Amino acid sequence: MITQDEARGEVGRPRRAGRADVIALLGDARAQAAWAAALVADVDGARSAVVSAFEAMRARLAETDLARVPVDRVRDVTEGRLSLDGLAAHGVRTIADVLRAGTHGLQAAPGIGPQSAARIVAAAEQIARAARESVQLRIEVDPSDRLATELLRAVRTWEAVVGDDETLVPQLRRLVDDVSRASLTAAPAAAGPLRRLFIGGTRKAAADEAVAHLTDLVAWARSADVARAATRISETVRHVVPTTAAWADFERRSATYYALLAPLVDLREDVAAATGFLPGEIVGRIGAQHLDESLLRASLRGYQAFGARFALVQRRVIIGDEMGLGKTVQAIAAMAHLVAGGATHVLVVAPASVVHTWVRELATHSALPALLLHGDARDEAAAHWVAHGGVAVTTFSTLRRLALDDASPAMLVVDEAHFVKNPDAKRSQAVARVAARSDRVLFLTGTPMENTVEEFCALVRHLRPELADAIDPGAGAAGADAFRSAVAPVYLRRNLDDVLAELPPLVQVDEWEEFGAVDGAAYRAAVEAGSFPAMRRAAFVSTDPRESAKLERLLEICAEAGANGHKVVVFSWFREVLDVVHAALSPTTAVLGPLTGSTSAAARLRLVDEFTAAPGPAVLVAQVRAGGVGLNIQAASVVVLCEPQVSPALEAQAIARAHRMGQVRTVRVHRLIVEDSVDQRLLETLETKRGVFDAYVRESALTDAAAAAIDVSAPHLARAIVADEQARLAGA
């Protein structure tokens, strides 16, 4: 029940009302309750639509599986007591055939009577129930799939209906009940003077109190604007999302769709894998930890919520999830919980190549105030953070120079934490000083640690020195299970194949970088010269990663992918860029290519075959216009785009070479983007046309036809971007 204090808030009102006022109040209250009931019904309907669409897909998948199960399996259920002779000759060969035929149809088979037919169908239904319960949903990209399209529409509607305030619907349910009860109790207050003479004092007092409560309820409903919310949700649930828009949105945000599905249906999550195979005692403590998501703007998967709670409960830990599982959002969820609870200072330390990405991710996935401590104004920004708090983001090198001795962060987050495995390095020592003053410390690394116990212990020593000293050096050699058992209090790692039953999704990440001295000078020279192509490739002017922010990040991505056994394809429009990438990777990586527009068809196939057959990690470099057409690069599960493409269709076709039917791994796409450059201007220009392109993002006969409508490579657009950049730099 909504209490009077809750409903009233700051609203004051007289405690007594005349008969006409009471009658008007009852009408108003019933109207507000009707709006609330309609809203609740629409929300319940949206939820039911998701569940129904999911069950329809699951039933179809189960039926497909049952079509492969021979009818002889009935004997396993009935311990061989049934005779199945004659069924095959009658066309009943599988469990699916049995269910379609039913009891009546089976009796047409020779030697099958009513009793046998009923028992065979009952056994088949038992097998079917087991099949439905074991189905794992994977939404394949197929706009012609009616059931999958309906599921995507239902999930998208559910997302729009639920919105940010999940507390409103329970409040509205109580409002409907309260109005119904209070209206009955308040009825005597609306009676005429003569009738009131025959109403006892107790009933009059109760009626007056009910009138007061109804007044508060109506005031609350108006302040919550229930009528407007009900109208909006009604329009939302009745809007039919076009098929092309539904699939385009799913391709962009598939992880969000599965995260929204997870609380409503059974996605067959492997609980042991999701909890990193940690001991039951630790899992129990973590499960009891409440996670405050009020400042979070992301839907968490179960394993991600567990990771955030792990960081909160265990306090000083390493999350070593495989790349692509969302370590960043788990860290943001833990930070958001602490800040919602009153924490004031949080510090994130990361390589320079990802600090801008961290700032953007914080803004995208949370309501946390983020402050970048980097560049010329780092000291002023650091002083402001120490004085006022928030989430500060800085680099390893900048951390060494900042005066943060007065700061004691509620949480220190260290991304790419394997960078501090050398205790003698200055950046490791700087991190250690802050970690010693921090209440909680969260290290993030996608590099597997099972076979490098010595390096792992160096990381643990930053967190819990006593545990590092107790870890047996032979734990890694004893296998992953033994290693995880030894380090369970401090280390959580999950692998893609273990926790995402719906693989393969497409995970797309924009990697925002910042020009340094060398690549920045090359860019300014290109802008002054008015050369659009030179501006686009200026970030790769040097083969030295210390002189190229994009190249540094690209090498990090390839190294982490290689450590996890993944192959990478690197795309660029420019042959010169690919030559730089090839030269930088060659000393340490098996790199093939470049595959260019002049590569013959036979040579193209040979390169891809060599890439696919390579026994370990490998990198294929290719021009986007050459690699984007006519190739199946399914061996690659990591795609790097060196610069935004002027044709969205071309970029999508290139990604589709890896993310296509037959791919068994999550495909992660990293777009390298320099902030405040031609990259950002190009993305902003493309954004206005992205909606048109989304309808044709998949490979189809319409893709080429649509390209002309959305391609932004026209000379006048290039000139406009050049002019904008010249004006911006001139005014800088």
Image (cartoon, helix red, strand yellow):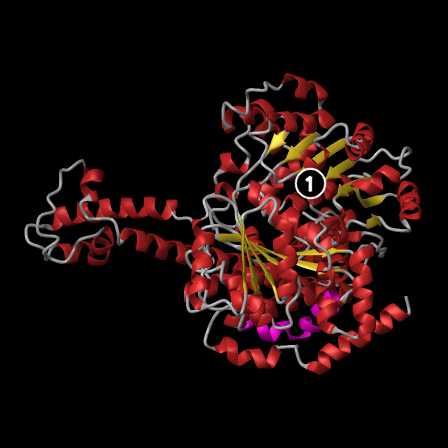
Could you tell me if residue 208 is visible in this image? no
Q: Position of residue 640 (x, y in %)?
A: 60, 57
Residue at 55 percent of width and 35 percent of height: 275
- Along the horizontal axis of the image, is 110 left or right of 242? left
Q: Position of residue 515 (x, y in %)?
A: 79, 57
Question: Left of 94 or right of it: where is 469?
Answer: right
Closest to the observer: 538 or 671? 538
Question: Residue sitting at 57 percent across and 46 percent down?
Answer: 589
Image spot of residue 557 (x, y percent): 63, 48
Tell me the magenta residue range: 679-695
Quarter of the rendering containing residue 509: bottom right
> Dominant secondary structure of the magenta stretch?
helix
Please tell me whether residue 20 belongs to the stretch shown in magenta: no
Give the residue type at disc 1. Glu
Q: Nearer the viewer, residue 410 or 377?
A: 377
Q: Is residue 139 rendered to the left or right of residue 722?
A: left
Q: Quadrant of the C terminus?
A: bottom right
Residue that appears at 83% across and 45% down: 390
How many residues crowd around disc 1 within 10 Å: few (fewer than 14), some, or many (20 or more)? some
Question: Which residue lies under the disc numbered 1?
Answer: 416
Task: Pick whichever, 327 or 731, lies toward us.
Answer: 731
